[in-house]
Image: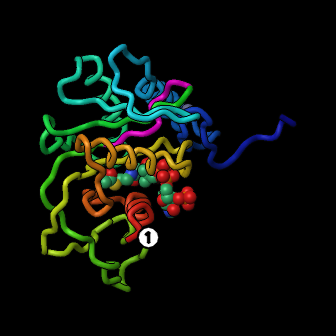
Amino acid sequence: DAGQKHFGPITCKSCGMIYTANSPEDAVQHTQYHRRFLEGIKYVGWKKEHVLAEYWDGKIIVILPDDPKYAIKKAEDVREIVDNELGFKQVALSCPSKSKIYMFVSTEKKVVGCLIAEQIKQAFKVLSEPVLDESINHEIQEHHRAWCCSTKPESAICGVSRVWVFSLYRRKGIASRMLDTVRNTFIYGSFLNKDEIAFSDPTPDGKLFATTYCGT
Ligand code: ACO
Ligand code: ZN
Protein backbone atom coordinates (compact mmCIF):
# COMPACT_ATOMS: atom_id res chain seq x y z
CA ASP A 1 0.00 0.00 0.00
CA ALA A 2 1.60 3.22 -1.16
CA GLY A 3 -0.67 5.25 1.09
CA GLN A 4 -3.25 6.02 -1.58
CA LYS A 5 -6.88 6.00 -0.49
CA HIS A 6 -9.17 3.49 -2.10
CA PHE A 7 -12.28 5.00 -3.62
CA GLY A 8 -15.16 3.30 -5.31
CA PRO A 9 -16.53 -0.18 -4.81
CA ILE A 10 -14.51 -3.12 -3.55
CA THR A 11 -15.48 -6.77 -3.38
CA CYS A 12 -14.79 -8.70 -0.17
CA LYS A 13 -12.74 -11.76 -1.10
CA SER A 14 -14.45 -13.91 1.56
CA CYS A 15 -18.14 -13.01 1.45
CA GLY A 16 -18.33 -11.43 -2.00
CA MET A 17 -20.14 -8.32 -0.80
CA ILE A 18 -19.49 -5.23 -2.87
CA TYR A 19 -19.19 -2.10 -0.74
CA THR A 20 -17.63 1.32 -0.71
CA ALA A 21 -14.38 1.43 1.17
CA ASN A 22 -14.76 4.93 2.50
CA SER A 23 -18.36 4.73 3.73
CA PRO A 24 -18.78 3.98 7.45
CA GLU A 25 -22.39 2.78 6.95
CA ASP A 26 -21.20 0.37 4.30
CA ALA A 27 -18.45 -0.86 6.56
CA VAL A 28 -20.94 -1.63 9.33
CA GLN A 29 -23.30 -3.34 6.90
CA HIS A 30 -20.46 -5.35 5.49
CA THR A 31 -19.24 -6.50 8.89
CA GLN A 32 -22.72 -7.74 9.77
CA TYR A 33 -23.36 -9.40 6.43
CA HIS A 34 -19.89 -10.95 6.38
CA ARG A 35 -20.34 -12.65 9.74
CA ARG A 36 -23.86 -13.89 9.06
CA PHE A 37 -23.04 -15.12 5.57
CA LEU A 38 -19.88 -17.04 6.49
CA GLU A 39 -21.65 -18.56 9.51
CA GLY A 40 -24.58 -19.57 7.29
CA ILE A 41 -22.51 -21.32 4.65
CA LYS A 42 -20.13 -22.99 7.12
CA TYR A 43 -20.49 -26.74 6.76
CA VAL A 44 -19.52 -28.97 9.64
CA GLY A 45 -20.99 -32.15 8.23
CA TRP A 46 -22.49 -35.17 9.92
CA LYS A 47 -22.09 -38.91 9.90
CA LYS A 48 -25.05 -39.98 7.81
CA GLU A 49 -24.84 -37.31 5.13
CA HIS A 50 -26.02 -38.40 1.68
CA VAL A 51 -23.08 -37.77 -0.63
CA LEU A 52 -24.21 -38.05 -4.24
CA ALA A 53 -21.11 -36.97 -6.14
CA GLU A 54 -17.51 -36.05 -5.40
CA TYR A 55 -15.21 -33.78 -7.37
CA TRP A 56 -11.73 -32.37 -6.98
CA ASP A 57 -13.19 -29.07 -5.75
CA GLY A 58 -16.03 -30.34 -3.58
CA LYS A 59 -18.97 -32.69 -3.21
CA ILE A 60 -22.71 -32.69 -3.69
CA ILE A 61 -24.95 -33.77 -0.84
CA VAL A 62 -28.73 -33.90 -0.54
CA ILE A 63 -30.90 -33.18 2.47
CA LEU A 64 -34.21 -35.00 2.52
CA PRO A 65 -37.40 -34.18 4.44
CA ASP A 66 -36.87 -37.07 6.88
CA ASP A 67 -33.28 -36.18 7.74
CA PRO A 68 -32.24 -35.34 11.31
CA LYS A 69 -32.98 -31.90 12.73
CA TYR A 70 -29.41 -30.57 12.41
CA ALA A 71 -29.34 -31.40 8.70
CA ILE A 72 -32.69 -29.68 8.13
CA LYS A 73 -31.45 -26.70 10.15
CA LYS A 74 -28.40 -26.31 7.90
CA ALA A 75 -30.59 -26.52 4.81
CA GLU A 76 -32.87 -23.83 6.23
CA ASP A 77 -29.98 -21.52 7.08
CA VAL A 78 -28.66 -21.81 3.53
CA ARG A 79 -32.13 -21.37 2.06
CA GLU A 80 -32.51 -18.16 4.03
CA ILE A 81 -29.32 -16.77 2.50
CA VAL A 82 -30.48 -17.79 -0.97
CA ASP A 83 -33.98 -16.35 -0.54
CA ASN A 84 -32.50 -13.16 0.76
CA GLU A 85 -30.29 -12.81 -2.29
CA LEU A 86 -33.11 -13.70 -4.68
CA GLY A 87 -35.40 -11.22 -2.96
CA PHE A 88 -37.87 -13.90 -1.87
CA LYS A 89 -39.50 -12.99 1.37
CA GLN A 90 -40.89 -15.86 3.37
CA VAL A 91 -41.89 -17.81 0.31
CA ALA A 92 -42.82 -21.20 1.62
CA LEU A 93 -41.95 -24.27 -0.38
CA SER A 94 -45.09 -25.53 -2.05
CA CYS A 95 -44.62 -28.89 -0.42
CA PRO A 96 -41.70 -29.26 2.02
CA SER A 97 -42.26 -32.98 2.43
CA LYS A 98 -41.53 -33.47 -1.27
CA SER A 99 -38.56 -31.11 -1.52
CA LYS A 100 -35.00 -32.24 -1.84
CA ILE A 101 -32.27 -29.76 -1.03
CA TYR A 102 -29.01 -30.29 -2.88
CA MET A 103 -25.88 -28.54 -1.72
CA PHE A 104 -22.44 -28.20 -3.24
CA VAL A 105 -19.90 -28.24 -0.41
CA SER A 106 -16.46 -26.90 -1.30
CA THR A 107 -13.23 -28.50 -0.11
CA GLU A 108 -12.94 -25.56 2.33
CA LYS A 109 -16.17 -26.85 3.91
CA LYS A 110 -18.45 -24.10 2.72
CA VAL A 111 -21.84 -24.51 1.11
CA VAL A 112 -21.20 -22.70 -2.17
CA GLY A 113 -24.19 -24.00 -4.12
CA CYS A 114 -27.79 -24.83 -3.33
CA LEU A 115 -30.60 -26.24 -5.44
CA ILE A 116 -34.13 -26.99 -4.26
CA ALA A 117 -36.06 -29.50 -6.31
CA GLU A 118 -39.69 -30.49 -5.95
CA GLN A 119 -41.72 -33.15 -7.62
CA ILE A 120 -44.18 -31.65 -10.10
CA LYS A 121 -46.56 -32.88 -12.75
CA GLN A 122 -46.63 -30.08 -15.27
CA ALA A 123 -44.91 -26.88 -16.34
CA PHE A 124 -45.34 -24.07 -18.85
CA LYS A 125 -42.76 -23.13 -21.46
CA VAL A 126 -41.35 -19.61 -21.44
CA LEU A 127 -42.18 -18.03 -24.75
CA SER A 128 -39.53 -16.14 -26.70
CA GLU A 129 -38.46 -12.72 -25.43
CA PRO A 130 -41.23 -10.57 -23.98
CA VAL A 131 -42.37 -7.77 -26.25
CA LEU A 132 -40.25 -4.75 -25.40
CA ASP A 133 -42.05 -1.60 -24.54
CA GLU A 134 -39.77 1.12 -25.93
CA SER A 135 -40.98 3.60 -23.33
CA ILE A 136 -39.53 1.53 -20.51
CA ASN A 137 -35.84 1.36 -19.75
CA HIS A 138 -34.46 -2.05 -20.81
CA GLU A 139 -32.43 -2.49 -17.66
CA ILE A 140 -35.59 -2.13 -15.60
CA GLN A 141 -37.44 -4.58 -17.84
CA GLU A 142 -34.69 -7.17 -17.38
CA HIS A 143 -35.10 -6.88 -13.65
CA HIS A 144 -38.84 -7.13 -13.84
CA ARG A 145 -38.35 -10.62 -15.15
CA ALA A 146 -41.85 -10.87 -16.53
CA TRP A 147 -41.32 -13.71 -18.92
CA CYS A 148 -44.37 -14.66 -20.92
CA CYS A 149 -45.41 -18.23 -20.51
CA SER A 150 -47.36 -20.57 -22.70
CA THR A 151 -50.79 -21.48 -21.37
CA LYS A 152 -50.41 -25.04 -22.54
CA PRO A 153 -49.23 -27.33 -19.75
CA GLU A 154 -46.45 -29.78 -20.59
CA SER A 155 -45.62 -32.74 -18.45
CA ALA A 156 -42.57 -32.36 -16.25
CA ILE A 157 -41.25 -34.31 -13.28
CA CYS A 158 -38.83 -32.13 -11.41
CA GLY A 159 -39.31 -28.47 -10.59
CA VAL A 160 -36.29 -26.40 -9.62
CA SER A 161 -37.66 -23.75 -7.30
CA ARG A 162 -34.27 -22.27 -6.45
CA VAL A 163 -30.76 -22.59 -7.78
CA TRP A 164 -27.97 -20.50 -6.35
CA VAL A 165 -24.19 -20.42 -6.42
CA PHE A 166 -22.06 -18.20 -4.14
CA SER A 167 -20.99 -15.20 -6.25
CA LEU A 168 -17.27 -15.94 -5.91
CA TYR A 169 -17.77 -19.49 -7.23
CA ARG A 170 -19.86 -18.82 -10.32
CA ARG A 171 -19.05 -19.98 -13.86
CA LYS A 172 -17.20 -23.05 -12.63
CA GLY A 173 -19.92 -25.47 -13.59
CA ILE A 174 -21.29 -25.81 -10.04
CA ALA A 175 -24.94 -25.22 -11.00
CA SER A 176 -24.53 -27.55 -14.00
CA ARG A 177 -23.06 -30.29 -11.83
CA MET A 178 -25.84 -29.89 -9.26
CA LEU A 179 -28.43 -30.20 -12.01
CA ASP A 180 -26.70 -33.27 -13.53
CA THR A 181 -26.82 -34.83 -10.08
CA VAL A 182 -30.51 -33.97 -9.67
CA ARG A 183 -31.33 -35.58 -13.02
CA ASN A 184 -29.35 -38.64 -12.00
CA THR A 185 -30.77 -39.11 -8.53
CA PHE A 186 -34.17 -37.39 -8.28
CA ILE A 187 -36.09 -40.50 -9.29
CA TYR A 188 -34.36 -43.65 -8.16
CA GLY A 189 -33.11 -45.73 -11.04
CA SER A 190 -33.90 -43.33 -13.85
CA PHE A 191 -32.11 -40.47 -15.54
CA LEU A 192 -34.30 -37.44 -16.21
CA ASN A 193 -34.19 -35.76 -19.59
CA LYS A 194 -33.54 -32.04 -19.70
CA ASP A 195 -37.13 -31.47 -20.82
CA GLU A 196 -38.48 -33.18 -17.72
CA ILE A 197 -37.03 -30.39 -15.57
CA ALA A 198 -38.68 -27.01 -15.13
CA PHE A 199 -37.43 -23.82 -13.49
CA SER A 200 -39.84 -21.66 -11.54
CA ASP A 201 -39.89 -17.95 -12.34
CA PRO A 202 -36.20 -17.56 -13.19
CA THR A 203 -34.10 -14.46 -12.59
CA PRO A 204 -32.15 -13.11 -15.59
CA ASP A 205 -29.09 -15.11 -14.40
CA GLY A 206 -31.25 -18.17 -13.91
CA LYS A 207 -32.73 -17.83 -17.35
CA LEU A 208 -29.30 -17.52 -19.00
CA PHE A 209 -28.07 -20.54 -17.12
CA ALA A 210 -31.18 -22.64 -17.80
CA THR A 211 -31.19 -21.73 -21.48
CA THR A 212 -27.56 -22.82 -21.88
CA TYR A 213 -27.92 -25.91 -19.74
CA CYS A 214 -31.09 -27.12 -21.41
CA GLY A 215 -30.03 -26.01 -24.88
CA THR A 216 -33.33 -24.24 -25.48
N1 ACO B 1 -24.65 -15.08 -17.85
C1 ACO B 1 -24.52 -15.75 -19.01
N2 ACO B 1 -24.43 -17.11 -19.09
C2 ACO B 1 -24.48 -17.80 -17.95
C3 ACO B 1 -24.60 -17.16 -16.68
C4 ACO B 1 -24.69 -15.74 -16.66
N3 ACO B 1 -24.82 -15.05 -15.51
N4 ACO B 1 -24.59 -18.11 -15.72
C5 ACO B 1 -24.47 -19.30 -16.35
N5 ACO B 1 -24.40 -19.13 -17.70
C6 ACO B 1 -24.30 -20.17 -18.74
C7 ACO B 1 -22.90 -20.18 -19.30
O1 ACO B 1 -22.97 -20.58 -20.65
C8 ACO B 1 -22.22 -21.24 -18.47
O2 ACO B 1 -21.14 -21.86 -19.12
P1 ACO B 1 -19.70 -21.11 -19.25
O3 ACO B 1 -19.35 -20.57 -17.89
O4 ACO B 1 -18.78 -22.20 -19.70
O5 ACO B 1 -19.91 -20.03 -20.26
C9 ACO B 1 -23.32 -22.24 -18.27
O6 ACO B 1 -24.52 -21.46 -18.18
C10 ACO B 1 -23.14 -23.10 -17.02
O7 ACO B 1 -22.99 -22.26 -15.90
P2 ACO B 1 -22.54 -22.80 -14.46
O8 ACO B 1 -21.10 -22.46 -14.21
O9 ACO B 1 -22.92 -24.22 -14.30
O10 ACO B 1 -23.47 -21.87 -13.54
P3 ACO B 1 -23.10 -21.23 -12.13
O11 ACO B 1 -22.51 -22.27 -11.25
O12 ACO B 1 -22.32 -20.00 -12.35
O13 ACO B 1 -24.55 -20.85 -11.54
C11 ACO B 1 -26.49 -19.44 -11.32
C12 ACO B 1 -25.52 -20.16 -12.29
C13 ACO B 1 -27.05 -20.45 -10.32
C14 ACO B 1 -27.66 -18.84 -12.11
C15 ACO B 1 -25.69 -18.33 -10.57
O14 ACO B 1 -25.35 -17.33 -11.49
C16 ACO B 1 -26.45 -17.66 -9.43
O15 ACO B 1 -26.50 -18.19 -8.33
N6 ACO B 1 -27.02 -16.46 -9.64
C17 ACO B 1 -27.70 -15.69 -8.60
C18 ACO B 1 -28.92 -16.39 -8.10
C19 ACO B 1 -29.92 -16.64 -9.21
O16 ACO B 1 -30.31 -15.72 -9.91
N7 ACO B 1 -30.34 -17.90 -9.34
C20 ACO B 1 -31.34 -18.32 -10.33
C21 ACO B 1 -32.68 -18.06 -9.74
S1 ACO B 1 -33.97 -18.74 -10.74
C22 ACO B 1 -34.47 -20.10 -9.93
O17 ACO B 1 -34.00 -20.33 -8.84
C23 ACO B 1 -35.43 -21.05 -10.55
ZN1 ZN C 1 -16.90 -9.81 3.60
In what quadrant of the picture does the C terminus appear? bottom left
Residue 26 screen position, x and y as percent: 53, 38
Residue 6 screen position, x and y as percent: 73, 42
Inspect this view and state whether residue 33 appears: no
Up/down of 94 relative to 123, above or below? above
Residue 122 screen position, x and y as percent: 14, 61
Residue placed most toward the observer, 126 or 58: 58
Residue carrying label 1? 139
Residue at the top extreme of this rendering: 47
| Residue at x 58%, y 34% (from the top left corner) | 56
| Residue at x 44%, y 48% (from the top left corner) | 175
Please, what is the three-letter code of the amino acid marked with disc 1? Glu
Residue at the front extreme of this rendering: 189
Residue 120 placement, left or right of 114: left
**Magenta range:** 108-115
Residue 39 screen position, x and y as percent: 44, 23
Up/down of 208 relative to 179, above or below? below
Specify whether tag 1 is near ligand 1 (CB below 8 Å). no
Inspect this view and state whether residue 138 appears: yes
In the structure shown, which secondary structural element does the residue marked by tag 1 occupy? helix
Residue placed most toward the observer, 11 or 129: 129
Q: How many marks?
A: 1
Chief secondary structure of the magenta portion: strand
- Quadrant of residue 140 within the rendered picture: bottom left
Q: Residues within 10 Å of mark 1 (few under 14, many from 20)?
A: few
Asked if residue 152 lies in the magenta stretch, the reply is no
